[in-house]
Protein backbone atom coordinates (compact mmCIF):
# COMPACT_ATOMS: atom_id res chain seq x y z
CA UNK A 1 0.00 0.00 0.00
CA UNK A 2 2.91 2.36 0.68
CA UNK A 3 4.98 1.46 -2.35
CA UNK A 4 2.56 2.84 -4.97
CA UNK A 5 2.28 6.46 -3.67
CA UNK A 6 6.00 6.57 -2.90
CA UNK A 7 6.96 5.48 -6.41
CA UNK A 8 4.52 7.88 -8.07
CA UNK A 9 5.75 10.73 -5.85
CA UNK A 10 9.35 9.91 -6.80
CA UNK A 11 8.42 9.98 -10.49
CA UNK A 12 6.74 13.35 -9.98
CA UNK A 13 9.87 14.69 -8.28
CA UNK A 14 12.00 13.56 -11.23
CA UNK A 15 9.78 15.49 -13.62
CA UNK A 16 9.79 18.56 -11.38
CA UNK A 17 13.57 18.39 -11.11
CA UNK A 18 13.80 18.20 -14.90
CA UNK A 19 11.69 21.32 -15.19
CA UNK A 20 13.46 23.24 -12.42
CA UNK A 21 17.06 22.38 -13.27
CA UNK A 22 16.61 21.86 -16.98
CA UNK A 23 13.64 23.00 -19.05
CA UNK A 24 9.92 23.04 -18.32
CA UNK A 25 9.31 22.50 -22.01
CA UNK A 26 11.29 19.27 -21.85
CA UNK A 27 9.59 18.18 -18.63
CA UNK A 28 6.12 18.73 -20.06
CA UNK A 29 7.11 17.02 -23.31
CA UNK A 30 8.25 13.95 -21.37
CA UNK A 31 5.09 14.04 -19.27
CA UNK A 32 2.77 14.22 -22.30
CA UNK A 33 4.46 11.38 -24.13
CA UNK A 34 4.56 9.46 -20.85
CA UNK A 35 0.78 9.79 -20.56
CA UNK A 36 0.28 8.50 -24.11
CA UNK A 37 2.73 5.67 -23.43
CA UNK A 38 0.71 4.87 -20.32
CA UNK A 39 -2.40 4.44 -22.51
CA UNK A 40 -0.45 2.05 -24.76
CA UNK A 41 0.92 0.17 -21.74
CA UNK A 42 -2.61 -0.21 -20.33
CA UNK A 43 -3.74 -1.83 -23.57
CA UNK A 44 -0.85 -4.31 -23.55
CA UNK A 45 -1.36 -4.99 -19.84
CA UNK A 46 -4.98 -5.91 -20.51
CA UNK A 47 -3.85 -8.51 -23.03
CA UNK A 48 -0.86 -9.90 -21.14
CA UNK A 49 -1.63 -9.10 -17.52
CA UNK A 50 -5.31 -10.07 -17.65
CA UNK A 51 -5.24 -12.96 -20.12
CA UNK A 52 -1.62 -13.95 -20.82
CA UNK A 53 -1.82 -13.06 -24.54
CA UNK A 54 1.54 -12.12 -26.06
CA UNK A 55 1.09 -9.37 -28.67
CA UNK A 56 4.33 -8.83 -30.61
CA UNK A 57 2.75 -6.50 -33.18
CA UNK A 58 1.81 -3.52 -31.02
CA UNK A 59 3.34 -1.18 -33.59
CA UNK A 60 0.69 -2.19 -36.14
CA UNK A 61 -2.25 -1.38 -33.87
CA UNK A 62 -0.66 1.93 -32.87
CA UNK A 63 -0.12 2.79 -36.55
CA UNK A 64 -3.64 1.94 -37.65
CA UNK A 65 -5.01 3.99 -34.77
CA UNK A 66 -2.83 6.89 -35.90
CA UNK A 67 -4.48 6.72 -39.33
CA UNK A 68 -7.80 7.86 -37.85
CA UNK A 69 -6.94 11.59 -37.41
CA UNK A 70 -5.82 11.68 -41.07
CA UNK A 71 -9.04 10.14 -42.40
CA UNK A 72 -11.42 11.79 -39.96
CA UNK A 73 -10.04 15.23 -39.11
CA UNK A 74 -8.01 16.38 -42.10
CA UNK A 75 -9.89 18.46 -44.69
CA UNK A 76 -10.96 16.63 -47.86
CA UNK A 77 -8.65 16.71 -50.86
CA UNK A 78 -10.75 18.44 -53.55
CA UNK A 79 -11.36 16.18 -56.52
CA UNK A 80 -9.74 13.09 -55.01
CA UNK A 81 -12.91 11.22 -54.11
CA UNK A 82 -14.64 12.04 -57.39
CA UNK A 83 -11.53 10.84 -59.26
CA UNK A 84 -11.13 7.48 -57.56
CA UNK A 85 -13.57 7.11 -54.68
CA UNK A 86 -16.08 4.98 -56.59
CA UNK A 87 -13.31 2.70 -57.83
CA UNK A 88 -12.04 2.18 -54.27
CA UNK A 89 -15.53 1.34 -53.01
CA UNK A 90 -16.07 -1.15 -55.83
CA UNK A 91 -12.66 -2.76 -55.30
CA UNK A 92 -13.24 -3.29 -51.58
CA UNK A 93 -16.78 -4.55 -52.24
CA UNK A 94 -15.40 -7.11 -54.71
CA UNK A 95 -12.74 -8.21 -52.19
CA UNK A 96 -15.30 -8.68 -49.41
CA UNK A 97 -17.66 -10.55 -51.75
CA UNK A 98 -14.86 -12.90 -52.88
CA UNK A 99 -13.83 -13.66 -49.30
CA UNK A 100 -17.42 -14.21 -48.25
CA UNK A 101 -18.02 -16.55 -51.18
CA UNK A 102 -14.89 -18.51 -50.27
CA UNK A 103 -16.10 -18.83 -46.66
CA UNK A 104 -19.54 -20.08 -47.78
CA UNK A 105 -17.98 -22.65 -50.12
CA UNK A 106 -15.60 -23.80 -47.38
CA UNK A 107 -18.51 -24.36 -45.00
CA UNK A 108 -21.01 -26.05 -47.31
CA UNK A 109 -19.17 -27.77 -50.15
CA UNK A 110 -17.44 -31.14 -50.15
CA UNK A 111 -13.68 -31.46 -49.91
CA UNK A 112 -13.15 -32.03 -53.63
CA UNK A 113 -15.29 -29.02 -54.55
CA UNK A 114 -13.51 -26.82 -52.01
CA UNK A 115 -10.08 -27.72 -53.37
CA UNK A 116 -11.05 -26.42 -56.81
CA UNK A 117 -13.61 -23.71 -56.11
CA UNK A 118 -11.88 -21.73 -53.35
CA UNK A 119 -8.64 -21.01 -55.29
CA UNK A 120 -10.69 -20.05 -58.37
CA UNK A 121 -12.93 -17.70 -56.36
CA UNK A 122 -9.97 -16.02 -54.66
CA UNK A 123 -8.02 -15.67 -57.90
CA UNK A 124 -10.99 -14.22 -59.80
CA UNK A 125 -11.74 -11.91 -56.89
CA UNK A 126 -8.14 -10.67 -56.84
CA UNK A 127 -8.20 -9.92 -60.57
CA UNK A 128 -11.47 -8.02 -60.25
CA UNK A 129 -10.17 -6.17 -57.19
CA UNK A 130 -7.02 -5.04 -59.01
CA UNK A 131 -9.06 -3.98 -62.04
CA UNK A 132 -10.88 -1.39 -59.93
CA UNK A 133 -8.20 -0.63 -57.31
CA UNK A 134 -5.24 0.23 -59.57
CA UNK A 135 -6.89 2.93 -61.73
CA UNK A 136 -8.66 4.42 -58.70
CA UNK A 137 -5.50 4.87 -56.62
CA UNK A 138 -3.56 6.23 -59.61
CA UNK A 139 -6.26 8.82 -60.18
CA UNK A 140 -6.26 9.85 -56.50
CA UNK A 141 -2.48 10.14 -56.28
CA UNK A 142 -2.45 12.35 -59.39
CA UNK A 143 -4.57 15.02 -57.66
CA UNK A 144 -2.34 17.80 -56.25
CA UNK A 145 0.61 15.44 -55.87
CA UNK A 146 2.98 18.00 -54.33
CA UNK A 147 0.72 18.94 -51.42
CA UNK A 148 -1.74 16.05 -51.12
CA UNK A 149 -2.04 13.08 -53.48
CA UNK A 150 -4.35 11.25 -51.07
CA UNK A 151 -8.04 11.04 -50.27
CA UNK A 152 -7.89 13.49 -47.40
CA UNK A 153 -10.27 13.39 -44.48
CA UNK A 154 -13.80 14.29 -43.45
CA UNK A 155 -12.95 17.52 -41.64
CA UNK A 156 -14.52 16.39 -38.36
CA UNK A 157 -13.22 17.40 -34.90
CA UNK A 158 -10.08 15.62 -33.75
CA UNK A 159 -11.80 14.33 -30.62
CA UNK A 160 -14.01 12.24 -32.92
CA UNK A 161 -10.96 10.59 -34.48
CA UNK A 162 -9.67 9.20 -31.16
CA UNK A 163 -12.48 6.64 -30.65
CA UNK A 164 -12.41 5.94 -34.40
CA UNK A 165 -8.71 5.04 -34.04
CA UNK A 166 -9.71 2.60 -31.32
CA UNK A 167 -12.32 1.09 -33.67
CA UNK A 168 -9.74 0.72 -36.47
CA UNK A 169 -7.39 -1.16 -34.15
CA UNK A 170 -10.25 -3.27 -32.78
CA UNK A 171 -11.20 -4.30 -36.32
CA UNK A 172 -7.64 -5.36 -37.10
CA UNK A 173 -7.51 -7.25 -33.78
CA UNK A 174 -10.72 -9.08 -34.65
CA UNK A 175 -9.20 -10.31 -37.93
CA UNK A 176 -6.01 -11.47 -36.18
CA UNK A 177 -7.88 -12.97 -33.26
CA UNK A 178 -10.31 -14.98 -35.37
CA UNK A 179 -7.33 -16.43 -37.21
CA UNK A 180 -4.82 -17.12 -34.45
CA UNK A 181 -6.44 -17.18 -31.01
CA UNK A 182 -7.62 -20.75 -31.36
CA UNK A 183 -4.01 -21.88 -31.78
CA UNK A 184 -1.10 -22.04 -29.34
CA UNK A 185 0.24 -18.82 -27.84
CA UNK A 186 3.41 -18.87 -29.95
CA UNK A 187 1.29 -18.77 -33.11
CA UNK A 188 -0.42 -15.65 -31.80
CA UNK A 189 2.96 -13.98 -31.31
CA UNK A 190 3.96 -14.84 -34.88
CA UNK A 191 0.61 -13.69 -36.30
CA UNK A 192 0.64 -10.36 -34.49
CA UNK A 193 4.24 -9.74 -35.52
CA UNK A 194 3.35 -10.33 -39.16
CA UNK A 195 0.13 -8.30 -39.07
CA UNK A 196 1.93 -5.39 -37.42
CA UNK A 197 4.55 -5.27 -40.15
CA UNK A 198 1.89 -5.59 -42.86
CA UNK A 199 -0.07 -2.62 -41.49
CA UNK A 200 3.04 -0.43 -41.28
CA UNK A 201 4.11 -1.49 -44.77
CA UNK A 202 0.71 -0.56 -46.20
CA UNK A 203 0.85 2.88 -44.58
CA UNK A 204 4.33 3.46 -45.95
CA UNK A 205 3.55 2.44 -49.52
CA UNK A 206 -0.09 3.35 -50.20
CA UNK A 207 0.20 7.08 -50.91
CA UNK A 208 -3.51 7.43 -51.69
CA UNK A 209 -4.31 6.59 -48.07
CA UNK A 210 -1.94 8.75 -45.96
CA UNK A 211 0.68 9.95 -48.46
CA UNK A 212 3.08 7.14 -47.51
CA UNK A 213 6.58 8.34 -46.70
CA UNK A 214 5.66 11.84 -47.92
CA UNK A 215 3.86 12.25 -44.56
CA UNK A 216 0.71 14.18 -43.67
CA UNK A 217 1.33 17.50 -41.91
CA UNK A 218 -0.93 20.04 -40.26
CA UNK A 219 -3.27 17.64 -38.46
CA UNK A 220 -5.78 19.80 -36.54
CA UNK A 221 -5.63 20.08 -32.79
CA UNK A 222 -8.37 19.10 -30.37
CA UNK A 223 -10.42 21.69 -28.54
CA UNK A 224 -9.36 23.69 -26.55
CA UNK A 225 -5.69 23.45 -27.63
CA UNK A 226 -4.71 26.48 -29.78
CA UNK A 227 -1.68 26.86 -32.02
CA UNK A 228 1.34 28.61 -30.57
CA UNK A 229 1.39 31.28 -33.27
CA UNK A 230 -2.21 32.27 -32.50
CA UNK A 231 -1.32 32.81 -28.85
CA UNK A 232 1.75 34.83 -29.79
CA UNK A 233 -0.40 37.12 -31.96
CA UNK A 234 -2.83 37.71 -29.10
CA UNK A 235 -2.11 40.99 -27.34
CA UNK A 236 -3.79 39.96 -24.10
CA UNK A 237 -1.77 36.72 -23.97
CA UNK A 238 1.57 38.43 -24.60
CA UNK A 239 0.81 41.05 -21.95
CA UNK A 240 -0.14 38.36 -19.43
CA UNK A 241 3.05 36.44 -20.22
CA UNK A 242 5.13 39.60 -19.81
CA UNK A 243 3.58 40.21 -16.41
CA UNK A 244 5.02 36.83 -15.30
CA UNK A 245 8.37 37.62 -16.86
CA UNK A 246 8.04 34.97 -19.60
CA UNK A 247 8.58 35.65 -23.28
CA UNK A 248 5.55 34.97 -25.53
CA UNK A 249 7.19 32.08 -27.40
CA UNK A 250 7.99 30.12 -24.23
CA UNK A 251 4.64 30.98 -22.67
CA UNK A 252 2.70 29.79 -25.74
CA UNK A 253 4.62 26.51 -25.87
CA UNK A 254 4.05 25.83 -22.17
CA UNK A 255 0.36 26.69 -22.43
CA UNK A 256 -0.19 24.31 -25.33
CA UNK A 257 1.63 21.47 -23.59
CA UNK A 258 -0.30 22.03 -20.38
CA UNK A 259 -3.60 21.86 -22.24
CA UNK A 260 -2.51 18.66 -23.97
CA UNK A 261 -1.51 17.24 -20.59
CA UNK A 262 -4.97 18.01 -19.20
CA UNK A 263 -6.70 16.23 -22.11
CA UNK A 264 -4.44 13.20 -21.90
CA UNK A 265 -4.90 13.00 -18.14
CA UNK A 266 -8.68 12.95 -18.54
CA UNK A 267 -8.47 10.08 -21.02
CA UNK A 268 -5.95 8.15 -18.91
CA UNK A 269 -7.93 8.53 -15.69
CA UNK A 270 -11.10 7.36 -17.44
CA UNK A 271 -9.28 4.32 -18.83
CA UNK A 272 -7.78 3.44 -15.43
CA UNK A 273 -11.19 3.73 -13.77
CA UNK A 274 -12.79 1.46 -16.38
CA UNK A 275 -9.89 -1.00 -16.28
CA UNK A 276 -10.01 -1.23 -12.48
CA UNK A 277 -13.77 -1.78 -12.53
CA UNK A 278 -13.37 -4.52 -15.12
CA UNK A 279 -10.50 -6.16 -13.25
CA UNK A 280 -12.41 -6.36 -9.97
CA UNK A 281 -15.62 -7.59 -11.62
CA UNK A 282 -16.57 -11.27 -12.13
CA UNK A 283 -15.43 -10.88 -15.74
CA UNK A 284 -11.97 -9.77 -14.57
CA UNK A 285 -11.68 -12.68 -12.15
CA UNK A 286 -12.71 -15.04 -14.93
CA UNK A 287 -10.03 -13.62 -17.25
CA UNK A 288 -7.33 -14.14 -14.64
CA UNK A 289 -8.59 -17.68 -13.99
CA UNK A 290 -8.28 -18.41 -17.71
CA UNK A 291 -4.79 -16.89 -17.71
CA UNK A 292 -3.64 -19.03 -14.80
CA UNK A 293 -5.14 -22.32 -15.99
CA UNK A 294 -6.96 -22.53 -19.32
CA UNK A 295 -7.75 -26.23 -18.92
CA UNK A 296 -9.45 -25.75 -15.57
CA UNK A 297 -11.40 -22.73 -16.84
CA UNK A 298 -12.58 -24.67 -19.90
CA UNK A 299 -13.64 -27.54 -17.64
CA UNK A 300 -15.81 -25.06 -15.72
CA UNK A 301 -17.65 -24.21 -18.94
CA UNK A 302 -15.82 -21.03 -19.95
CA UNK A 303 -15.33 -20.35 -23.66
CA UNK A 304 -11.60 -19.66 -23.52
CA UNK A 305 -11.19 -18.70 -27.19
CA UNK A 306 -14.09 -16.23 -27.08
CA UNK A 307 -12.80 -14.58 -23.91
CA UNK A 308 -9.31 -14.33 -25.39
CA UNK A 309 -10.81 -12.67 -28.46
CA UNK A 310 -12.67 -10.18 -26.26
CA UNK A 311 -9.64 -9.06 -24.30
CA UNK A 312 -7.42 -9.03 -27.38
CA UNK A 313 -9.83 -6.67 -29.14
CA UNK A 314 -10.21 -4.44 -26.08
CA UNK A 315 -6.47 -4.16 -25.49
CA UNK A 316 -5.77 -3.46 -29.17
CA UNK A 317 -8.50 -0.80 -29.19
CA UNK A 318 -6.79 0.96 -26.28
CA UNK A 319 -3.50 0.84 -28.24
CA UNK A 320 -5.29 2.32 -31.26
CA UNK A 321 -6.65 5.10 -29.06
CA UNK A 322 -3.11 5.86 -27.88
CA UNK A 323 -1.91 5.88 -31.49
CA UNK A 324 -4.54 8.46 -32.46
CA UNK A 325 -3.63 10.63 -29.46
CA UNK A 326 0.06 10.45 -30.39
CA UNK A 327 -0.57 11.59 -33.98
CA UNK A 328 -2.63 14.49 -32.64
CA UNK A 329 0.20 15.55 -30.33
CA UNK A 330 2.80 15.32 -33.10
CA UNK A 331 0.59 17.13 -35.62
CA UNK A 332 1.77 14.86 -38.44
CA UNK A 333 1.50 11.31 -39.71
CA UNK A 334 4.93 9.81 -40.43
CA UNK A 335 4.60 6.11 -41.33
CA UNK A 336 8.38 5.77 -41.55
CA UNK A 337 8.68 6.38 -37.81
CA UNK A 338 6.70 3.28 -36.84
CA UNK A 339 9.43 0.87 -35.84
CA UNK A 340 9.04 -2.16 -33.54
CA UNK A 341 11.86 -0.99 -31.25
CA UNK A 342 9.88 2.08 -30.22
CA UNK A 343 6.29 0.86 -30.42
CA UNK A 344 6.58 -2.80 -29.42
CA UNK A 345 9.76 -3.49 -27.47
CA UNK A 346 9.64 -0.28 -25.44
CA UNK A 347 5.96 -0.74 -24.54
CA UNK A 348 6.72 -4.26 -23.33
CA UNK A 349 9.55 -2.92 -21.18
CA UNK A 350 7.10 -0.43 -19.65
CA UNK A 351 4.63 -3.18 -18.74
CA UNK A 352 7.29 -5.55 -17.37
CA UNK A 353 9.09 -2.90 -15.33
CA UNK A 354 5.88 -1.36 -13.98
CA UNK A 355 4.27 -4.64 -13.03
CA UNK A 356 2.33 -7.00 -15.28
CA UNK A 357 -1.30 -7.37 -14.24
CA UNK A 358 -1.35 -4.08 -12.31
CA UNK A 359 -2.84 -1.08 -14.11
CA UNK A 360 -1.11 1.44 -11.87
CA UNK A 361 2.17 -0.39 -12.38
CA UNK A 362 1.78 -0.08 -16.15
CA UNK A 363 1.20 3.67 -15.85
CA UNK A 364 4.23 4.13 -13.59
CA UNK A 365 6.40 1.97 -15.85
CA UNK A 366 5.32 3.93 -18.93
CA UNK A 367 6.20 7.36 -17.52
CA UNK A 368 9.43 6.12 -15.92
CA UNK A 369 10.71 4.28 -18.99
CA UNK A 370 9.85 7.16 -21.31
CA UNK A 371 11.69 9.53 -18.97
CA UNK A 372 14.78 7.32 -19.00
CA UNK A 373 14.49 6.70 -22.76
CA UNK A 374 14.43 10.47 -23.40
CA UNK A 375 17.14 11.41 -20.94
CA UNK A 376 19.49 8.63 -22.08
CA UNK A 377 19.87 10.48 -25.36
CA UNK A 378 21.49 13.33 -23.40
CA UNK A 379 23.22 11.24 -20.77
CA UNK A 380 24.95 8.99 -23.29
CA UNK A 381 27.22 11.60 -24.92
CA UNK A 382 27.89 13.21 -21.51
CA UNK A 383 28.91 9.88 -19.97
CA UNK A 384 31.11 8.99 -22.93
CA UNK A 385 32.67 12.44 -22.70
CA UNK A 386 33.66 11.82 -19.08
CA UNK A 387 34.95 8.31 -19.83
CA UNK A 388 37.07 9.40 -22.80
CA UNK A 389 38.30 12.71 -21.31
CA UNK A 390 41.79 11.34 -20.60
CA UNK A 391 42.19 9.34 -23.80
CA UNK A 392 44.30 10.38 -26.75
CA UNK A 393 42.42 12.23 -29.45
CA UNK A 394 41.91 10.09 -32.52
CA UNK A 395 42.53 6.79 -30.76
CA UNK A 396 40.49 3.81 -31.90
CA UNK A 397 38.96 3.19 -28.47
CA UNK A 398 37.97 6.84 -27.94
CA UNK A 399 36.42 7.09 -31.39
CA UNK A 400 34.53 3.83 -30.87
CA UNK A 401 33.14 4.91 -27.47
CA UNK A 402 32.08 8.33 -28.76
CA UNK A 403 30.39 6.80 -31.79
CA UNK A 404 28.58 4.35 -29.51
CA UNK A 405 27.07 7.08 -27.33
CA UNK A 406 23.82 7.08 -29.29
CA UNK A 407 23.30 3.41 -28.35
CA UNK A 408 23.06 4.32 -24.66
CA UNK A 409 19.28 4.29 -24.99
CA UNK A 410 19.27 0.56 -25.73
CA UNK A 411 21.83 -0.15 -23.02
CA UNK A 412 19.83 1.86 -20.48
CA UNK A 413 16.55 0.07 -21.29
CA UNK A 414 18.18 -3.35 -21.09
CA UNK A 415 19.96 -2.50 -17.84
CA UNK A 416 16.78 -1.17 -16.20
CA UNK A 417 14.81 -4.25 -17.19
CA UNK A 418 17.53 -6.60 -15.92
CA UNK A 419 17.76 -4.78 -12.59
CA UNK A 420 14.00 -4.84 -12.09
CA UNK A 421 13.76 -8.52 -13.02
CA UNK A 422 16.58 -9.31 -10.60
CA UNK A 423 15.39 -7.36 -7.56
CA UNK A 424 11.64 -7.09 -8.23
CA UNK A 425 10.72 -9.90 -10.65
CA UNK A 426 7.01 -9.02 -10.65
CA UNK A 427 7.64 -5.35 -11.41
CA UNK A 428 7.81 -2.18 -9.36
CA UNK A 429 4.12 -2.41 -8.43
CA UNK A 430 3.23 -6.13 -8.58
CA UNK A 431 -0.20 -7.56 -9.16
CA UNK A 432 -2.03 -8.30 -5.92
Image (cartoon, rainbow, N blue to C red):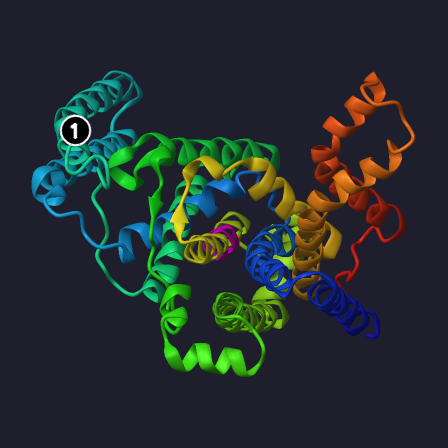
Q: Quadrant of residue 359?
A: bottom right
Q: Main secondary structure of the magenta part?
A: helix
Q: Is 195 on the left-hand or right-hand side of 392?
A: left
Q: Is residue 225 visible?
A: no
Q: Position of residue 143 (x, y in %)?
A: 14, 37
Q: Position of residue 112 (x, y in %)?
A: 28, 17
- Residue sitting at x 88%, y 46%: 422
User: How many residues crowd around disc 1 within 10 Å: few (fewer than 14), some, or many (20 or more)?
Assistant: some
Above or below — where is 226 with respect to 299? below
Above or below — where is 298 with respect to 431? above
The N terminus is located in which quarter? bottom right
Q: Position of residue 294 (x, y in %)?
A: 64, 48
Secondary element at tag 1: helix
In depth, the one of 400 and 168 nearer the eye is 400
Q: Which residues are magenta?
A: 310-318
Q: Position of residue 153 (x, y in %)?
A: 23, 52
Which residue is denoted by mark 1 in the rendering? 138
The C terminus is located in which quarter? bottom right
Q: Is 308 on the left-hand or right-hand side of 27?
A: left
Residue extending farthest to the left is: 82
In depth, the one of 399 and 41 nearer the eye is 399
Above or below — where is 163 with respect to 243? above
In depth, the one of 275 and 377 nearer the eye is 377
User: Would residue 362 be counted in the magenta stretch?
Assistant: no
Amino acid sequence: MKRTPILFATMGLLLLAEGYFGSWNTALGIFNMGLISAVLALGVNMQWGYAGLFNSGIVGFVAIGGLAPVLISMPPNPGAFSAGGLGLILSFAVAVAALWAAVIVNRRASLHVRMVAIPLILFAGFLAYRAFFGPATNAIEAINTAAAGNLGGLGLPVAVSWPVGALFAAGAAWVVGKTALGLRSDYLAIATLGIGEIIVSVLRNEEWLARGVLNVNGIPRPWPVPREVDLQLSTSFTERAASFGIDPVTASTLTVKLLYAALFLIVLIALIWLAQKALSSPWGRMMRAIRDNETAAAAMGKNVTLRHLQIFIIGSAVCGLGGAMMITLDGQMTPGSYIPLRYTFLIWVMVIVGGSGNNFGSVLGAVLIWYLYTKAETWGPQLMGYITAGMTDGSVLKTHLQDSAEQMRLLTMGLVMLLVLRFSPRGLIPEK
